[in-house]
Every structure is written in structure tokens, then in C-alpha cells.
Amino acid sequence: FVVGDSHVLSLAWQTLCIDPSKVSRNNYDLQNDVQEQSPIHRTAIPFPATGMKAWHVRPSTQFFTHYNLRACLQRLPSFSGRSIILSAGEIDCREGIGGSLLQGYYSNCSDAVERTVIEFLTALTNLAEEYQLQILVMPVAPHAYRSEKNGKSMGRARRRETMCLWNEILRRELTCGRSLPQPNNLQSKYDRVFLLDYERKLQHADTNSPVGYVLHPSYNADYTHVNGAILPLVEDAILHCGCDLTLL
């Protein structure tokens, strides 16, 4: 099941093929019985919570998107695998994080982005525990190239910088320490939450972009959303994110 903002539709109704045999046997999290599994096929069923921001996932949020998210989670069939792919964050980056702090992005907006990401991941961890789920988080895909001649180039540049920072913090928080074995009594800071780390593969070099890249044209749907061509990237990211493949 793919839950979250409108970006879940990029995967909607496609069949994911997860082949455990493609994962290196050096991966400490992978048990032998998982490696011997046949390929896992799952249809990506969309549960959109349109307009959902990452900030709306917090339990203190009193906005319809938060209640819509909970309604989606409550509708998940109990007999299915206990994993979901979740998408949120693009609207936060596009509409602005930190309000007036955006004007001083280089000096202090990073703190606002970091706080938002950490609040988001903390809320996801609580939801994963509450609903007994394993949550696989989609990164925020970069926007495609747009002409700078229509007077919106400054706003787009800021959004690209925010998206880049967002993904860097996601990567730091969800992958740091997971490459090494953990003692049996020590859980990850964000237990049950994993990053699908394919965002770098979406990048296409562009010297006019403030971050040095835009969305690769082959993945562009409408300049904001990616198209279904990301499916192989998602499949590979699931294999290597450290999640429990037996829960898919």
C-alpha cells in the first residue's frame, strides 16, 4: 500500500518485484531464510491523503489531512503485509518551511527544515508502533527544469535548495548507524521507519540549478511529480533500505 500525498500516484497499481537474492549476503540484517525466498510481487495500491504535508503527520495536528491519513491507515486490510510506502514532504518544501526564515535561508532556514524532518520521523515512528507497521519513506523528488524567464526563478531556486536539504537530513537520520550491526537490546532511533534512498538516481546535472541538478527528463510527469519509470528504483531501494522483507 502506498499512502500519502499525490506523489503516491506515481506508483499506483504497478507491480513491485522484490527479489531477495539480489541483496549481498554481507547485509547483516538479511537472514538466510529471506535470501532463499522467491521474488516477492506486490501491487502498489494507492491510499492518497491529498494535500498532506509532513508537518501534518504530527499527533497534535488539527487539520483534515491528518485525519485523512489516519482514516487511510485504519482502512488497511489486516490480512495483508504489514508494510506501507509513505510519501510526504514535497508540499512542505514547495510551500515553504519556516515562514519568514526562508528569507535568510543560508543562515537559519536549515534549522527549520531539520526540525520539520525530525518531527515528521518521530511522528511516523509513533504511527508505525500504533498500527504495527513497517513504513518505507519516499524521498522528495527534485522538480524538473523550468524556464527562468517567467519571473519565478528565485522561488524555484529556494524550493530546490529546501528539497536538497530535506533529503540530506532524511538520509542522515534514517541511514546513519544502520550500516553496522546493532546489539539485540538496542533499537534504531526511528524503529520501523526506513528510507527508500533513490533520490540521487533521479538527478540530472544542470549548472543553472542552485543545487547543481534538476529532475532527469525521463522521470518527469508534470514538472512536479515523477512518472511510473521510478518503479525499478523503488524496487532496488526496498531491497537495500534495511527493512524486514518478510513483512512486505
Image (cartoon, rainbow, N blue to C red):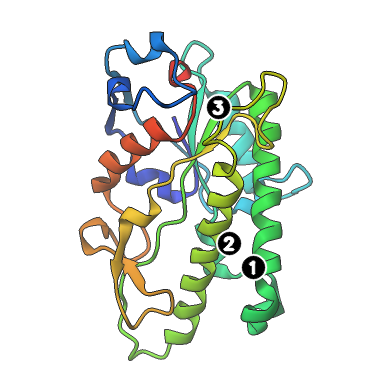
> 225 above or below 61?
below
- How far across and down, in percent of the image, does residue 41 sit? 29, 21
Pointer 3 and pointer 1: residues touching (CB < 8 Å)? no
Residue visible at 30% across and 74% down? 145
Tell me if I can see residue 52 in this picture: no
- Residue bearing mark 1: 97
Q: Quadrant of the N terminus?
A: top left
- How far across and down, in percent of the image, does residue 201 sit? 31, 54
Pointer 3 and pointer 2: residues touching (CB < 8 Å)? no
Give amino acid for label 1.
Ile
Which element type, helix, strand or loop, lies under badge 2? helix
Which element type, helix, strand or loop, lies under badge 3? strand
> 151 above or below 206?
below
Give amino acid for label 3.
Gln
Residue 154 located left or right of residue 96: left
CA neighbours of label 3 inside 10 A, class few (<14), some (14 to 19), many (20+): many
Q: Residue 134 carries which label?
A: 3
Sequence-first disc among 3 and 2? 2
- Residue bearing mark 2: 92
> 246 above or below 13?
above
